Amino acid sequence: MDEIKIKQCGKCKKVKPITEFGKRALNRDGFQGHCKRCNNELSKLWRLRNPEKVKISNKKTRIKNRAKRVKATKKWREENKDHVRAYAKEYTQRDYVKEKGRRYMNASRRKAGIPVMPAMSEEEKKMSINERKKYRYQRDETERTKAIKRAKKYQLKNKEKVSKYKTEWTRNKMRTDIHYRLKQKLSKRIWDALNGICKSTTTEELIGCTIVELMAHFELQFTEGMSWENYGKWHVDHIRPCASFDLSKESEQRECFNYTNLQPLWAFDNMSKGARY
């Protein structure tokens, strides 16, 4: 049999090089009926329509491949010993870790009747407390709730001061930070499109789907209580934060604002998440 060099896609009907088709032994020619691009689009659509099945499948895959992940992690650590060692050294120098180690060591010394290690200076204590507060805020939901309540209370008491600070901060950030300015403009473009204020092909090219499809994508991920009427209580969140992209590059703009990187997230959770993912 002659070697196949081109083939027509069963979905888009375009004739493409055979390299654009995945292999499938069950088919007579040994290749899939749809091209790779069409298969990817069909796969994305199926995942959008079947979020629960995707969630279950991902969980099964994680459990099934747990041993592989552990092995891969161990291999990576062996191959990147310098990086691991540097991180461990930096971690142990953090103030809250030092204080924790000091308390643990002193408890052991007291039991053994050995003099305890000297207490931290006031400056060290202050730094340590701040570090611990930051750590607890990131890890502890109760601590985040307390911090947000304190912030709201302060804002209510100092509305004019807070408003002035926000205005000056935003103006300065827009003037000096190109990435922040681009992020704000691109985010506004998406939200305007969702609200029907503008609906340009450039926006749809940016997010990788139509506005209707984007709204459906969000609705599939709505948790209890979310609706378009209470937007503001929930935010459009970037799964991988904007800060991790170079938004001066168009290719990274498309990746950052692609619908697959967007999700609805309660405002509290979004603010708590920060730039982590």
Image (cartoon, helix red, strand yellow):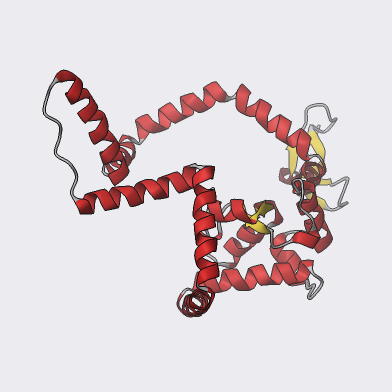
**What percent of the width, then of the height, locates residue 208?**
73, 59
Q: Residue furthest front?
A: 157
Residue 230 appears in the rendering: yes
Residue shown at 82%/26% (left/top)?
26
Q: Quadrant of the N terminus?
A: top right
**What percent of the width, then of the height, locates residue 177?**
47, 73
Q: Residue furthest top?
A: 112
Q: Which of the pair 181/15 is nearer the observer?
A: 181
Image position of 13 (left or right of 130)? right
Q: Is residue 261 above or below residue 250?
A: above
Q: Which of the pair 265/240 is nearer the observer?
A: 265
Tell me the quarter of the picture where residue 84 sits.
top left
Tell me the quarter of the picture where residue 48 sits.
top right
**What percent of the width, then of the height, locates residue 265?**
66, 52
Residue 276 appears in the rendering: no
Residue shown at 88%/51% (left/top)?
13
Q: Which of the pair 42/194 is nearer the observer?
A: 194
